Image (spheres, rainbow, N blue to C red):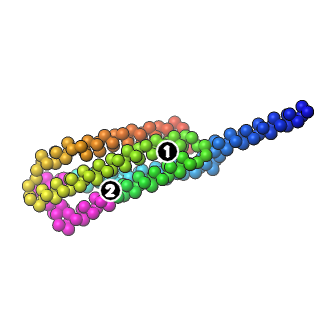
Amino acid sequence: MKKAVVILLVAVLSLAMLVFLGGCGGDADKEEAQSLMNSGDNYMSEMKLSTEELQSMQADLTAAAMGGDPSALTGEAGDAMQAQVEDILNSMESSLESAQAEYEKILELEGVQDYKDYATKMLEAIDIYTEQLGYTRTLIGMLVESLTSMAASGNFDLNNLMALMESEEFTKIEELGTQGDELVEEAEQIKIDKKLES
């Protein structure tokens, strides 16, 4: 009888260990989580590059308008410029959506809680950046319209541009950008603390 109890106890403990290990996720889940994390991070890097490209274009357009050179803002060049801006915005949106899909897959894995914590924080950041992108589209449209009008009339109105910088859209872009960046920093700290890249 005692032997049967011992065997039963060993069986129960073994089963409990299997359940526990299954809940923690195996090496395969960890490798997949790491792969998905890296893929999501790559998409976020692409989004950042697109953001820098957009900022550079804005600076060039403003400089052209201030210099009294309407050629980049009117006619075929103006149409091409607007198409290029739209392509950049679409690229940013696509990168965010792709990153979101990768991070969401991490949440579906068994165990890998540290990766889930990282993914959750990045998903929060993506929500913020997506909202920011909406305001960016609106502000870019306002800026392009204003610069095109100035270029066509030959009259550069600094007050008009300054008004855009004080608009609700500009304020929201600044605020949301800060919030998103802070969430990404928190996610990066999780990656460092939990050694998710090792």
Is 176 placed left or right of 6 in the picture? left
Regarding residue 195, the answer to whether it shows in the image is: no
Q: Nearer the viewer, residue 127 or 35?
A: 127
The N terminus sits in image quarter: top right
The reply to whether the magenta stretch includes residue 88 is yes
Q: Residue at x 45, y 52 (%)?
A: 99
* Left or right of 67, for residue 176: right
Q: Are marks 1 and 2 in contact (CB under 8 Å)?
A: no
Residue 38: x %, y % from top left: 50, 50
Q: Secondary structure at mark 1?
A: helix
Mark 2 crowdedness (10 Å alpha carbons): few <14, some 14-19, many ≥20? many
Magenta stretch contains residue 32: no
Query: Quarter of the image containing the C terminus?
Result: top right
Which amino acid, by three-letter code, is at mark 2?
Leu
Closer to the camera in the image, 58 or 179: 179
Q: Earlier in the sequence, mark 1 or mark 2?
A: 2
Which span of residues is magenta-colored?
60-89
In percent of the image, x 29 and y 44: which residue is there? Answer: 173
Q: Measured from the top left, where is residue 98 in percent x and y?
A: 45, 55
**Mark 2: secondary structure:** helix
> Total of numbered circles in the picture?
2
- Residue that label 2 marks: 89
